[in-house]
Amino acid sequence: MVVIISKFLISIFGLLVGYILLKNKKFKDFELYQFVIYGFLTRWIILSVWFFFFEGRVSGDLYAYELHVSWVLEGKIPNRDFSTPYGFYFNYLLSIPYYLFKNPIAIMLILQLFELFGFCLFFLSIKKLLSINRAKLFAMLYITNPLVIGWLAFDGQDEALMIFAFGGIFYSISHSSRLLNSFFSSFSLFAVKITALAAILPIVMVSNRKEILRIILFFLLFLLIPIILNSKVFGFGFEWKHGVDDLTAYFFPGNIWFLIDKFSLNQNLLLYSRFLTLVLFLIISLFLFKFKNKISKPIFISFGVCLFTFSFQIGSSYVSPGFIATVIPFLIFLLLINNILNDKHIYFFNLYSLLIPFDLATYLIWEKNYKNVLSEDLFYLIFYPYEILIICLNVIIYIILIKFFLKIVDRHISIKLKY
C-alpha cells in the first residue's frame, strides 16, 4: 500500500510541475537535454530510496525480470526452457547490465535509458513535423505525465522499452527512413512484446509492396536465432519459481469482463472477450484501410496505434495500464495537431492519465495482503465505481479518437479540394 500511495503522490507532483510550467510558459525556455536531465533526476532521486531502503525493488514484475535474466545468464532459452510473455530478445537486452552489476537497479536503469532515448526520438520527430515550440510542449506533457511517472518512471515496466521502439518507428516515419522503420518494427515485436502489432498493422497498411517485403525480411532476420535455438518465440505465460501463470486465463482489472466475471457464472466469458477484441480489431482495420491515403503517414500511424491499443484495452480480458502508457506519446502528438488546442484539453488528458494506472496494483495488493482485513463485499463496493469510471473513460477516449480522425480526414480532403 505504501507503494501505491507513493506512486500517487509522485504522479500528483508531476501534475503540479506540469501545471506550473504550462501556466507560466517556462517550458519554452527549456532545451531537449534539460528535459532529459529533469526526467532522469526525478526518476532516480525517488527510486534510490526504494532500491537502497526497500529491498531494491518497486514493481512485482521486476522480480520476474530479475528471475528471467538470471535464467538467461545460466543458458536457458526464453519460451523453450521457461515461459515469458516478452519478446525473445527482451531478457538478453536486460542481461547485459545485470551481468556487469547483479542488482535490480541495473535492470531499471537500462529500461529507463531506453525510454528516455525513445522520448528524444519522439521530440525530434515532432520538432520536424510541427515546430520547436510544439516539440517542447510535447516534452513537458510527456515528462510530467502521471501515467508515465507512475508506470514507467516509478515501476520501470517493460513498456519503457516499447517507448524506445515506438519512438524509433515514429522517427523513421517522420524522416522517411524505410530501413529504420523495418528495423524498429521488428525490434518492437521481437524485443518487447506482441502488443507491438498495434503499430505494425497501420505501418503495413500505408506501406507499398517493396516496403512490406523489407519488413518481412527483417522479421525473418529477427526470427533466425530463436528458430535455431528451438524457441516458440512468443509466449503468453509468466513463469515464476513456483510455476507458470497463464495471462490469457485471467480477467484483469480495467475492462468490462472483470466486472461481469464477478456477477456471472458463464464459463464462456474468455471466449466472448476474445471475440469482441477480434471484432473491434476488424472494424478498426476496415475503418483505417478506407482512409489510409487521405492523411499523412505520421498522423495515420498515430491514430492507428491508439485505436488498435484501445480496441484491445476495451475488448480483451487481458489489459494493463502499461498498454495505454505506450501510446501516451502518440496521444500527445494528436493533441498537438488540434487547431483549437487549449488548456482544458490538456487538463482532461492529464486527469485521465492520473486515474487509470492504479486499479491493477490496488486489486493485486488487496488480494495478496488485505483480503482477510477488508471484506470482499466492502472492497468491491469501493473498487467497482473506480473500475466503471476507468472503463467509461477508455470508451470516451476511443470515441474521441474516431471522431477526431474523421475530422482530420475531412480537413485534408477540404484542403485538397481548395488547392
Image: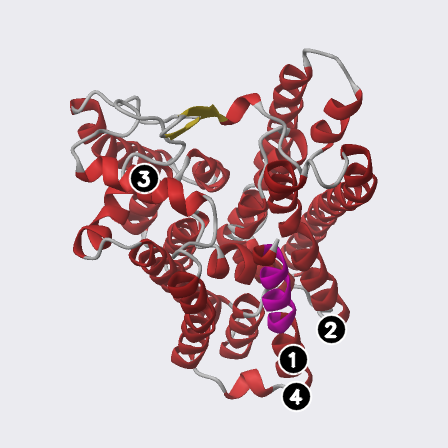
What amino acid is found at the position of numbered circle 4 in the picture?
Asn
Distance between mark 2 and mark 1 Cα atoms: 8 Å
At label 1, the amino acid type is Leu
The region drawn magenta spans 4-14
Element under disc 3? helix
Residue that appears at 59% across and 67% down: 10
Q: Earlier in the sequence, mark 4 or mark 3?
A: 4
Q: Check disc 3: other Cα within 10 Å, few if <14, some if 14-19, many if 20+.
A: some
Q: Which mark is residue 34?
A: none
Query: Would you name the residue on which mark 3 appears?
Result: 67
Q: In this picture, is 353 found above or below 30?
A: above
Residue wearing tag 2 = 343
Mark found first going from the N terminus, 2 or 1: 1
> At 64% across and 62% down in the image, what residue appears?
8
Kindly check if marks 4 and 1 are in contact, taking CB atoms under 8 A apart as contact. Answer: yes
Identify residue for label 4.
Answer: 24
Alpha carbon of mark 3 to alpha carbon of mark 2: how far?
44 Å
